[in-house]
Image (cartoon, coloured by chain):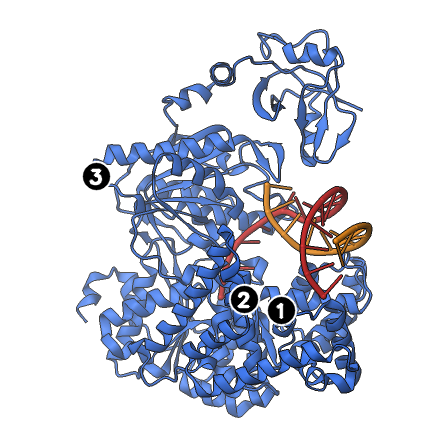
Chain colours: A blue, B red, C orange
Amino acid sequence: MSYLATLNEPQRQAVVTTEGPLMIIAGAGSGKTRVLTYRIAYLMEQGIEPYNILALTFTNKAAKEMQHRIEKVVGNEARSLWMGTFHSVFSKILRFEGEKLGYTSNFTIYDTDDSQSLIKSIVKEFNLDDKLYKPSVVFNRISGAKNRLISWQEYNRNPIYAAEDREQQKPEMGRLYKAYAERCFKANAMDFDDLLFNTNVLFRDHLDVLNKYQHKFRYVMVDEFQDTNLSQYLITRKLAAQHLNICVVGDDAQSIYSFRGADIQNILNFEKDYPNLNIVRLEQNYRSTKTIVNVANKVIANNQKQLRKEVWTDNDTGDLIELIKAATDGDEGRLVATSIFEEKMRGGGQIHNKDFAILYRTNSQSRSFEEALRKLNIKYRIVAGMSFYQRKEIKDLLAYLRFTLNTNDEESLKRIINTPRRGIGDSTVAKIVITANEKNISLWEVICKATTYLGSRIGKQLEDFMLMIKEFMVTVSKKDAYESALHVANKSGLLKELFDDKTVEGRARYENVQELLNGIKEFVDNPNTEGQLKTLPVFLQDVALLTNADENDGDDDKVTLMTIHASKGLEFKFVYVVGLEEDLFPSQMMLSNRNDLEEERRLFYVAITRAERKLFLSYALQRYRFGNLRFCEPSRFLDEIDSRYVRTMKPSSIREAISTPQTMTNFAHKKYGEMPQATNATRMPATRGNSTVVNKVTTTSNPTPTENPNFVPTAVEKLKAGQQVLHLKFGKGTIKRMDLEGTDKKAIVVFEQHGEKVLILSFAKLMVLG
DNA sequence: TTTGCGCGGGTTTTT
DNA sequence: CCCGCGCAAA
């Protein structure tokens, strides 16, 4: 127990308080993972068997990390711990107990794509307007209900929901929920929410089962507790009801998943649910400099909803925070890349690429940084959502395998029945679906008796397909996972189709499938899972729960680019939080209500607290989004940063050029040659697609001198003469902003001339006519 | 049944 | 900008 000596007092408390309910409020960088690791090790040293301990996390990454660290302390025994994400642990239990709910053990897990595609077909079958009932909207509504444990029966029974839906002009929602739930069940499939929902049902209706697991899990631990939704919370509460040894770890200031149903109230109310609750606060930050900690505290202090907590640190004061102001998104990329380059130079070989992270609000923001980093030859990697298992070719092969094991799986069937093309088109599939619904049998049963149900004309191709699947079933039952998958990939024609595709993308797709096959081979050959079956069903069970972030990235020395959400739990010496513009971060979609804004602020807090040594903040004054130019204002969050801790980045080369409006114009001039200047009144009549053709410009009589010293309206002259020389692109939201008459806001406009972007600056007031 | 084209719409985060 | 859809033509 030598490690106890390495802990500070609250940390030690958290480790040795093993009995009874415990809440650990762990500030950012306070050694949370360490505490959890030692706590489990400590339990085991007290003689608790590992299989009596359940540790739940939110991401596979966190689970893996913890498993790894515990193994380091206690050795191989750690393998018998029950540790994993909520979804993976309870899918395991449901595989075991699901029959009690009417599922077989090889039920399919529908990912979001599958779910939405099913909803889409239901909406179509119901003849509803698919613009009104967008799959994503319907899915979110259903998901929200499930996360609050509202079954479709309850949903249709309780008039509150119907009223809400009527208000949203979506009165059919209840019917859709019912149909969706029934279709999933019929397909022997559960979506992500079902895994938790059904666990709740299982524990509610089968007390013997609940009892079994209550006794099994004498100690329950939940990491990132602030991110639990009601469904998850109730599961843990039920499981811990017997022994009351529940330990939750969280930081309300880092709750950033409410869109997924996470309820910050779970952590705020925990005390009420457990009167004898022990509370430990971990407030000493070991990660960041004083400057960073202070700034983070100041920012989060703007939120109303939070638990009392004072994060502090003994670390050095460190560098000031650097604010990078860029003119465009492209400049932002260049400035950040240059800055990374310079930090590395300054570090004299001590600083590596892997010490840097660029964090943004949305995945689509990565582009400008990629380009700039590539130009400077700085290696980077992008942690993008969940792309590998989302790729079409991967999902195709998995769908074949899934369907072979579970022929009720409607979504997989629809995916593979005509992939690769085998002459079974939409109309045939539609007939099958209709017949299946009429006779209340599965699609597969219709296919097996195609001639009986559908007549002989379309029987042939279907029969070939059916025979192929039947043959796959035999193979899968006889061979191991890898050989089965390889067989299916070949015989289905998937591999051949991809192999024949000689385009660059085709190559990549072929390689992706190979990679999946390699992954399966690895699974089969992996000595670590000795004793486990290496069959396909075992491999397939939870691949739907895997995400890209779980791949081994290797230990390459690369700059990391990712969303702030993905950065949770990580730390980097140098962190760039980019795109700090109003409407982008905080996202405009979140601005409608106060809670959402607070969540955006927590997101900002998370981003800041990833930094160990130095934090950079950046924004661009204009950026292209969805092909449209947008004018940006600095994020309101920047105002929440104490200016004493900030310095604006020292200009060098490009930076110099864009640091002031005047020099910026010169810079653009040098770069693009003749520089037309903008006018202070623009008329934009005709709209063609996204770009507006400017064919008339009027200049108002007196441009404000201070704002507009050198008015050289070359292009404006042309326009006045009635020539169409400029394409002025406006986003929809931008037009509002262009209406600047009477305000003192400055505007920056980008014109495109002969297909080339020409930067034009105008500090005059712009007026939009028409 | 498949393919190609033009159009319009949506633009967040993830198990 | 990127997608998915609907429609027309092969």
Q: Residue A369 sits in which quadrant?
A: top left
Q: Do labels 3 and 2 touch, CB within 8 Å?
A: no
Tag 1's secondary structure?
Answer: helix
Q: Which residue matches tag 3?
A: A349
Q: Residue visible at 61% across and 87% down? A: A102
Instruction: Return the residue nearer the eye: A271 or A347.
Output: A347
- Give the label on residue A395, or none: 2
Q: Position of residue A557 (x, y in %)?
A: 29, 48
Q: Is residue A632 above or below residue A97?
A: above
Q: Earlier in the sequence, mark 2 or mark 1?
A: 2
Q: Chain of mark 1?
A: A
In this view, which residue lies farthest toward the bottom? A208
Instruction: Return the residue nearer the eye: C2 or A14.
Output: C2
Q: Earlier in the sequence, mark 3 or mark 1?
A: 3
Tag 2's secondary structure?
Answer: helix
Q: Earlier in the sequence, mark 3 or mark 2?
A: 3
Instruction: Return the residue nearer the eye: A619 or A200.
Output: A619
Q: Quadrant of the N terminus of chain A?
A: bottom left
